[in-house]
Amino acid sequence: MARIELVNLAHSYKAHPTSPSDYALLPMTMTWDDGGAYALLGPSGCGKTTLLNIISGLVIPSEGQVLFDGKDVTRLPTEARNIAQVFQFPVIYDTMTVRENLAFPLKNRGWKTADITKRVDQIAEILELTSDLKHRASGLTADAKQKISLGRGLVRPDVAAVLFDEPLTVIDPHLKWLLRRKLKEIHHELKLSLIYVTHDQVEALTFADQVVVMTQGEVVQVGSAQVLFEEPEHTFVGYFIGNPGMNLLPCSVSQNKVRINGLETSLSVPENFLHAVNNGSANNVIKLGIRPEFVECHATSIANSLPAQLSMVRNMGTHWLASCQLGEHKVAAKLRHEPGKVGSPIWLSFSSERTLFYVNDKRVR
Amino acid sequence: MKTYNNKAWWLIFPVILSVAFSAIMPLMTVVNYSVQDILGPDQAVFVGMEWFRAVMRDSDLHGALFRQLIFSIAVLVIQIPLGIGVALTMPAQGWRASLSLVLVALPLLIPWNVVGTIWQIFARGDIGLLGNTINNVGISYNYTGDSFDAWITVLVMDIWHWTPLVVLLCYAGLRAIPDAYYQAARIDGASRFAVFRFIQLPKLRNVLMIAVLLRFMDSFMIYTEPFVLTGGGPGNATTFLSQYLTQKAVGQFDLGPAAAFSLIYFLIILLFSFILYNWMQRVGTGDQA
């Protein structure tokens, strides 16, 4: 059990980093509360595995500190950190039985045989591995193997946090769900801190209380599923979370009105945004964002609507997905009813509460 | 009613033809020789199992077989652990890895009779660097006169020549182990020995099986190097099976006994390889009940 703090943490695999692109992990300061379930979400190569390996001690960061309960462990080796890690592919010791696999970390720490047996039985019970204890681990299915890797972490009673590095990648879809539920159960039962790395937003949002969204070595937002969905602080979060992602439309501002494609809208604009646009550099990229779920479509022109054309309509079973051509931009909309035929005109309206504004990819309120 | 299309036989005909010429016909020729006494051109008498009986009772052959077994066992016992050990100490990446790979592989590139010649000179007591040095430290060493010295020299030469093969196989096997295994072992607090015992060795099982089989078969058939180095001497000290066979077939032109022995030789290698293979298949995989 421990609170994990990252202070001005940054990492580069190069010896003398000069530009931000040399960094695998850009400077960050963050606190992970004891007993929390966190997910690290981001596309492949965004630095999430690097961050995980820094926490577990497999990688020593080039800058900054890692604190466990206020104690500096930055340079402490993995085995001294009370961290358990589950990898993308199940790591098991082929020649050992399931029991020997689970006992291995305790044996290495010099436990007595009787204590080991008791503890292993206990953990096997939680993981539903009791019937397999006598079997050789190499003969089991991928999900059972992954449970063993997890079990080797859980047997140590002093474990502060369990780190997961995309642990469900090689698991069958129908077992994924079971295993994920098992994880939540264990989290609930043992009150451990869990940090879960994934590039799958569904996995992240269903598993974690707090999701840390990363891209290109940078943490762009930390928040619950709802916050990430409703109030993305960065265009990347808007685009990455949700299916389809947020509509991000380049826009301009004149006379305190937002214009899309030169068409004036009645959206109310935050003061800060006007200020940033009017006083900022001409090279600033200015966008507005709206979730497909909040785009309203009308068959006829109504007040404050923008004319567009339906370019694609698809029945998704529970809803309709429409793609509308608004000038040179595409706008996706999730609708409850069929919006019309492909090629027919349609009018779109965006509500002010649901429309967010971004300058250079960062949200401005 | 089934329709048979016998044209398909033509598809496997090329294979049958090439296997017939490369394996079946030569082998059957040997079988043919082994049951006949060839007195001269077009003069052959069928003698049945006669040659097999004679060969089995030949005490020279017993000696050669015994020497051969001891030699092959020594080769395996020394080369396999040594190969694993060297592979474990080799760097995993960078220019050092390339350099050490090239250095290790060098002996494998040298033709067998050249290896024999190199060692013949290298180990000479009067002018050879190795032989002369050993004599100068006060140990009497003479591979042309002393049976034990000769036997050891052949063994050391084989170790120098063929351990690199084991090293390369193990090195490839080690590089194929994903990093996650080592990381998991660190998290589990495993010692260096535990990492070797529970991760590296089990993961090397398949390459080691290949290494053991190759080294067994090759060492059991060793011919060129001892032939060049010692000519089988002194006495019979380094006369191994294939050299004994050559003496019989080419030296004395006893085609019948030589053929009979060839077949026995072939069966011995097959039998031992089979036993080794099955043993290695099983070791470390049995379920504990």
Image: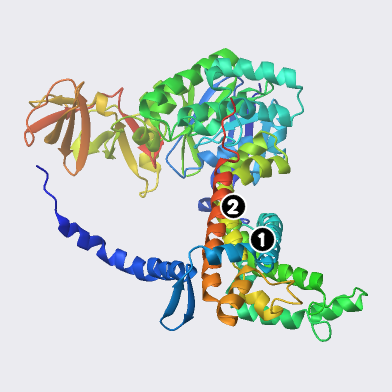
Q: Measured from the top left, where is residue A14 in percent x and y?
A: 59, 55
Please tell me whether residue B243 is drawn above or below residue B192 in the rendered image.
below
**Which quarter of the rendered picture does the C terminus of chain B lie within?**
top right
Q: Measured from the top left, where is residue B48 in percent x and y?
A: 48, 64
Query: Numbered disc 2: what chain?
Result: B
Whether discs 2 and 1 lie on one chain: the answer is yes
Q: Quadrant of residue B197?
A: top right
In the image, which disc is placed on residue B72? 1
Q: Measured from the top left, where is residue A158 in percent x and y?
A: 69, 22
Does residue A137 appear left or right of residue B159 in this picture?
left
Contact (Cβ within 8 Å) of mark 2 with mark 1? no
Q: Earlier in the sequence, mark 2 or mark 1?
A: 1
**Residue at horizontal 79 percent and vertical 72 percent from the top:** B147
The three-letter code of the residue at mark 2 reads Leu
Please tell me whether residue A191 is drawn above or below residue B4 in the rendered image.
above
The three-letter code of the residue at mark 1 reads Ser
Residue of label 2: B208
Does residue B217 appear left or right of residue B190 in this picture?
left
- Which is nearer the eye, A126 or B219? B219
Give the crowd class for mark 1: few <14, some 14-19, many >=20 residues within 10 Å. Answer: many
- State which mark lies toward you, 2 or 1: 1
Give the crowd class for mark 2: few <14, some 14-19, many >=20 residues within 10 Å. Answer: many
Q: Measured from the top left, where is residue A85 in percent x and y?
A: 59, 32
- Which is nearer the eye, B59 or B109? B59
**Residue at horizontal 42 percent and vertical 40 percent from the top:** A43
Q: Is disc 1 placed on a helix, strand or loop?
A: helix
